[in-house]
Image (cartoon, rainbow, N blue to C red):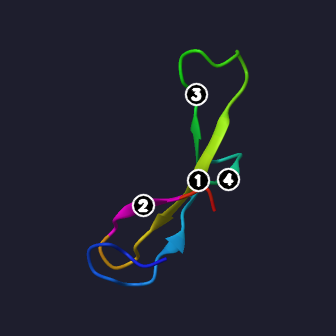
Amino acid sequence: MKCNYCKVEMRRAAYTDNTIYSTSEIYDVSEGTDVGKRRYVGKIYYCPHCGNLQVNLLD
């Protein structure tokens, strides 16, 4: 996946907490969905050159 702004190849975003390492993903928790149910939307990617964040929908 390439950055929409600078066209550099993007990397999968990840964040680190003191106790948790997790890759970033987007979930849709809309009104009307049952409690505890989430719909997967896509993974977050970042550009190491400009810092742009993008979501690769349903990959």
Distance from disc 1 to disc 3, alpha carbons, whole Å, reads: 13 Å
14 shown above or below 5: above
Badge 4 marks a residue whose secondary structure is strand
Q: Which mark is residue 22?
A: 4
Instruction: Give SS at disc 2.
Output: strand
Residue 38 at x, y percent in the picture = 67, 31
- Residue at the left extreme? 5
Mark 2, residue position? 54
Q: Which residues are magenta?
A: 51-56
Whether residue 16 can be seen here = no
Q: CA distance from mark 3 to mark 4?
A: 19 Å
Q: Residues within 10 Å of mark 1 (few under 14, many from 20)?
A: some
Mark 2–mark 4 distance (CA, rounded to whole Å)? 17 Å
Q: Element type at marker 3? A: loop
Task: Tell me which amino acid carries mark 1.
Answer: Gly
What residue is rendered at 64% in x and 19% in y?
A: 33
**Depicted 31 relative to depicted 50: above or below:** above
Amino acid type at mark 3: Val
The residue singled out by tag 3 in the image is 29
Residue 15, disc = none
- Circle 1 residue: 42
Looking at the image, residue 56 sits to the left or right of residue 19; the answer is left
Alpha carbons under labels 3 and 2: distance apart = 19 Å
Mark 1: which secondary structure? strand
Sequence-wise, which precedes: disc 2 or disc 4? 4
- Closer to the chain start, of discs 3 and 4, is 4
Does residue 40 appear anywhere in the picture? yes
